[in-house]
């Protein structure tokens, strides 16, 4: 397995560590997947959803939703009208 320094820096960053410490308390659903792709463009939301369904692994949560309790990593279909959030504005 190839190890990428950027991934490790992100995972050990302050904001990510804080989020991971409170994830199990704050979320009723959580899943993760990881892959490498050609180029630097972000994948589409549809591609990310497909990969969660096929390759995803559940994260531990204390109060799982019915979806999480069933062992699913994502709903079978994406919510209609879902749009990618706008990037933050920097000044």
Image (cartoon, rainbow, N blue to C red):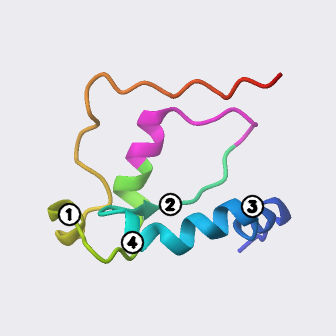
Q: Which span is picked out in magenta?
A: 38-50
Relative to 52, residue 30 above or below = below
Residue located at (67% from left, 28% from top): 88
Q: Position of residue 91 (x, y in %)?
A: 83, 22
Q: Earlier in the sequence, mark 2 or mark 3?
A: 3
Q: Position of residue 67 (x, y in %)?
A: 19, 60
Task: Give the structural element (helix, strand or loop) at label 1.
Answer: loop
Nearest to the eye among marks 4 and 2: give it. Answer: 4
Q: Nearer the viewer, residue 33 or 83?
A: 83
User: Which residue is label 1 attached to?
Assistant: 65
The answer to whether marks 3 and 4 mark residues whose Cβ atoms lie closer than 8 Å is: no
Q: Earlier in the sequence, mark 3 or mark 4?
A: 3
Q: Earlier in the sequence, mark 2 or mark 1?
A: 2
Nearest to the eye among marks 2 and 1: give it. Answer: 1
Task: Give the structural element (helix, strand or loop) at label 4.
Answer: helix
User: Which residue is label 2 attached to?
Assistant: 33
Left or right, 90 with respect to 45, comes to right
Marking on residue 10: 3
Q: CA distance from mark 1 to mark 4?
A: 13 Å
The answer to whether marks 1 and 4 mark residues whose Cβ atoms lie closer than 8 Å is: no
Q: CA distance from mark 2 to mark 1?
A: 19 Å
Q: CA distance from mark 3 to mark 4?
A: 22 Å
User: Which residue is label 4 attached to?
Assistant: 25
């Amino acid at each position: 397995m190839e190890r990428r320094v950027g991934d490790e820096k992100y995972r050990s960053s302050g904001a990510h560590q804080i989020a991971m410490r409170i994830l199990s308390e704050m979320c009723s659903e959580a899943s993760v997947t990881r892959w490498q792709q050609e180029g630097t463009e972000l994948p589409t939301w549809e591609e990310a959803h497909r990969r969660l369904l096929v390759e995803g692994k559940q994260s531990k949560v204390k109060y799982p939703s019915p979806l999480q309790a069933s062992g699913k990593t994502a709903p079978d279909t994406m919510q209609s009208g879902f749009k990618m959030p706008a990037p933050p504005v920097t000044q």
